[in-house]
Image (spheres, rainbow, N blue to C red):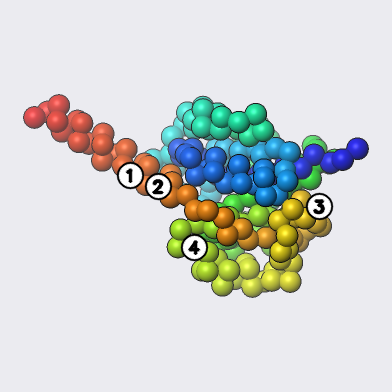
Amino acid sequence: MARLKIGLLGGSFNPAHEGHRHISLLALKQLQLDQVWWLVSPQNPLKAATGMAPLAQRLAGTRTMAMHPRIRASDLESRLGTRYTVDTLSALQRRWPRSAFVWLMGADNLVQLPRWHRWREIVEMVPMAIFNRPGQGHRALAGAAAARFARSRVRNPRKLADSAAPAWCFLFTPLHPASSTTIRANTTVETHWNETSKEA
């Protein structure tokens, strides 16, 4: 029986936006995946807790945004009790040994990957698909992670899920401008304006 090919998109999703859905749909098509799981992190170790919406609120937002039968939003990290990506991947592989997992992330995360806990082990555990982000593509490909695993780069995205790790590909796909940081900033400005207007 063929293995189920599952893309894993981890993050805070604070909030989920069209950009997350955009790369998930691209992953389903270009990587020939069966499903994409959005792993909503209880708390990203590299991000401050200040300004982080409650997990239940972020999870609800991802389920509203996904809007696709093959994109599933999950609080698996919370239920597994894992904090770091390397531990989450290890737990998923133990629980679903017959599934082929592919880690999905934006080029900005490839740039900062060497800051992740035991990052080399992550690369050596599952194939990785890197999606271009505005202003990040060339910087990511010139970074430490790409250089360290240059020989593991796969040129054909359709072969990635069946490749043994370490294996990664970079997809120069159509860019999507959405950013959680920008959305939060705009929401803060809008809330402040509305509150100021009420006081006037």
Indicate the secondary structure of the residue bearing disc 3: loop
Q: Position of residue 58 (x, y in %)?
A: 49, 32
Question: Circle 2 is placed at which residue position?
Answer: 181
User: Which residue type does callout 1 highlight?
Assistant: Ala
Q: Nearer the viewer, residue 75 or 127?
A: 127
Q: Between marks 4 and 2, how big is the CA–CA gap?
A: 16 Å
Give the residue type at disc 2.
Thr
> Mark 2 vs mark 3: which is more N-terminal?
3
**Separation of residues labelled 1 and 3 (CA atoms):** 40 Å
* Image quarter (top left, top right, bottom left or bottom right) of the C terminus: top left
Q: Secondary structure at mark 4?
A: loop
Which of the two discs, 4 and 2, labels the residue nearer the N terminus? Answer: 4
> What amino acid is labelled 4 in the image?
Gln
Residue at x-position 71% and y-position 56%: 157
Q: Quadrant of the N terminus?
A: top right
Residue at the location (49% across, 53% down)? 175
Q: Secondary structure at mark 1?
A: helix
Asked if marks 2 and 1 touch (Cβ < 8 Å), the reply is yes
Q: Which numbered marker is on residue 136?
A: 4
Precedes in sequence: disc 4 or disc 1:
4
Task: State left or right for residue 57 relative to residue 41.
Answer: left
Residue annotated with mark 1: 185
